[in-house]
Amino acid sequence: MAGTTPPTGLKRWLFHAPTYLYRARLGFVFGHRFLMIEHRGRRSGTRYRTVVEVAGRSSDEWFVAAGYGPGSDWYRNLVAGGLEAVWIGSRRHAATARFPDADEAARVFARYEADHPRAAKVIMDELGISYDGTDAGRVEMVRAIPMVAFSVG
């Protein structure tokens, strides 16, 4: 159920292009729909930057989904404690990460689907994700596509 393998070639370059805008402090062009995670490699210690779409927001947290599943490098680095910071707009913030359970993640994704139905469909098609549209099906889906909640401070 978790999506396809990460992109390669030109598509990979296009997916990484927003990182350069954030690093140039031009992240504001993405509004609050995207943010950039700075994280350390779990083995190498190398600093990486990954731009991800915001799936939801509460008053003090930003939720993002690991679209390529729990095997995504950035996700594995965060699980290992490699979070450095989160960029929102043009500002770098110290942050903490937590990993919501499937029920909470499913509620966040349900709100995302309601707020952005076309984007949700495009993303799910691109990643090869499908589910039966029920609440129980959504919970099963987010088990394969976990979420991270970032608190900035």
Image (cartoon, rainbow, N blue to C red):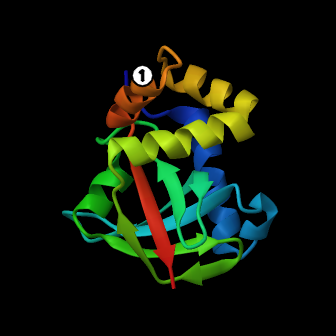
In the drawing, does residue 77 fall left or right of residue 104? left
Residue 49 or residue 113, whichever sits in front: 113
Amino acid under label 1?
A: Gly
Q: Residues within 10 Å of mark 1 (few under 14, many from 20)?
A: few
Residue 140 or residue 146, whichever sits in front: 140
In the rendered image, the residue lying farthest to the top is 132
Residue 152 or residue 100, whichever sits in front: 100
Residue that numbered label 1 is attached to:
137
Please state the horizontal and vertical placement of residue 66, each as a whole percent of the image. Answer: 43, 44
In the drawing, does residue 141 fall left or right of residue 14? left
In the rendered image, the residue lying farthest to the right is 29
Residue 91, by quadrant, is bottom right
Dot 1: what SS?
Answer: helix
Residue 105 or residue 124, whichever sits in front: 105
On screen, residue 72 above or below 139: below
On screen, residue 67 above or below 132: below
Please state the horizontal and vertical placement of residue 126, each as a whole percent of the image. Answer: 57, 24
Task: Give the position of the N terminus as an image quadrant.
Answer: top left
Q: Which residue is drawn at 54% across and 40% down?
A: 109
Residue 27, by quadrant, is bottom right
Q: Can residue 72 be seen in this view?
A: yes
Q: Which residue is drawn at 56% across and 64% down?
A: 36
